[in-house]
């Protein structure tokens, strides 16, 4: 019988133990890690973010955020390896930045100009950079 071992980074354990009942915690599992382990399948990004990801301008597990002071709203999303966004508080990933932003704000909104990378660039700015190259 095969054995399944799951090893969590200490930061993941800390996040899980500090989560409240209202938090959604996303855990991604991948195969691999040992010489005798099967290799993880390569995930190819698709959808609107695929070009940025293929160019290396946006990486899986990047945390995107936004804050709208006037509306007193904030959002946080994580980029998946396949180019979708997992938004805090939502169980299903979103295929586009705008759909992810709409899930947080409740309004139709341009997610490309709203979501920001940790270094402060909007997705639109990254897209402009890609177009210039």
Image: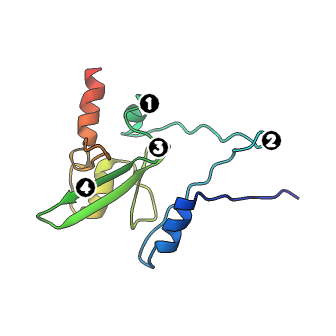
Of the pair 36 and 91, the residue shown nearer to us: 36
Residue 72 in the figure: left or right of residue 61: left
Q: Are marks 2 and 4 in contact (CB under 8 Å)?
A: no
Circle 2 — which element? loop
Which residue occupies 25% across, 55% down?
A: 66
Closer to the chain start, of discs 3 and 1, is 1
Q: Are marks 2 and 3 in contact (CB under 8 Å)?
A: no
Closer to the chain start, of discs 2 and 3, is 2
Closer to the chain start, of discs 1 and 4, is 1
Per the model, the C-alpha gap separating discs 2 and 3 is 25 Å
Per the model, the C-alpha gap separating discs 2 and 1 is 29 Å
Closer to the chain start, of discs 2 and 1, is 2
Looking at this view, name the residue that lies furthest to the bottom: 21
Q: What residue did someone put label 3 on?
A: 60
Q: What residue did someone put label 2 on?
A: 36
Q: Are marks 2 and 1 in contact (CB under 8 Å)?
A: no
Per the model, the C-alpha gap separating discs 3 and 1 is 11 Å
- The percent position of residue 63, horizontal first and vertical second, equals 38, 51
Dot in front, 3 or 1: 3
The C terminus: image quadrant: top left
Residue 82 in the figure: left or right of residue 7: left
- The percent position of residue 37, horizontal first and vertical second, equals 76, 43
Circle 3 — which element? loop
Dot in front, 1 or 4: 4
Circle 1 — which element? helix
Which residue occupies 39% across, 68% down?
A: 89
| Residue 81: mark in rendering | none
| Residue 66: mark in rendering | 4
């Amino acid at each position: 019988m095969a054995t399944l071992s799951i090893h969590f980074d200490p930061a993941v354990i800390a996040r899980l133990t500090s989560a409240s009942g209202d938090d959604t915690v996303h855990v991604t599992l991948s195969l691999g890690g040992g010489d005798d382990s099967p290799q993880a399948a390569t995930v190819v990004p698709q959808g609107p973010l695929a070009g940025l990801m293929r160019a290396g301008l946006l990486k899986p597990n990047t945390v995107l955020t936004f804050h709208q002071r006037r509306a007193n709203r904030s959002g946080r999303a994580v980029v998946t390896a396949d180019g979708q966004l997992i938004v805090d508080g939502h169980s299903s990933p979103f295929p586009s930045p705008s759909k992810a932003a709409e899930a947080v704000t409740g309004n139709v909104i341009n997610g490309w100009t709203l979501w920001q990378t940790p270094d402060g660039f909007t997705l639109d700015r990254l897209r402009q950079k890609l177009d210039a190259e």
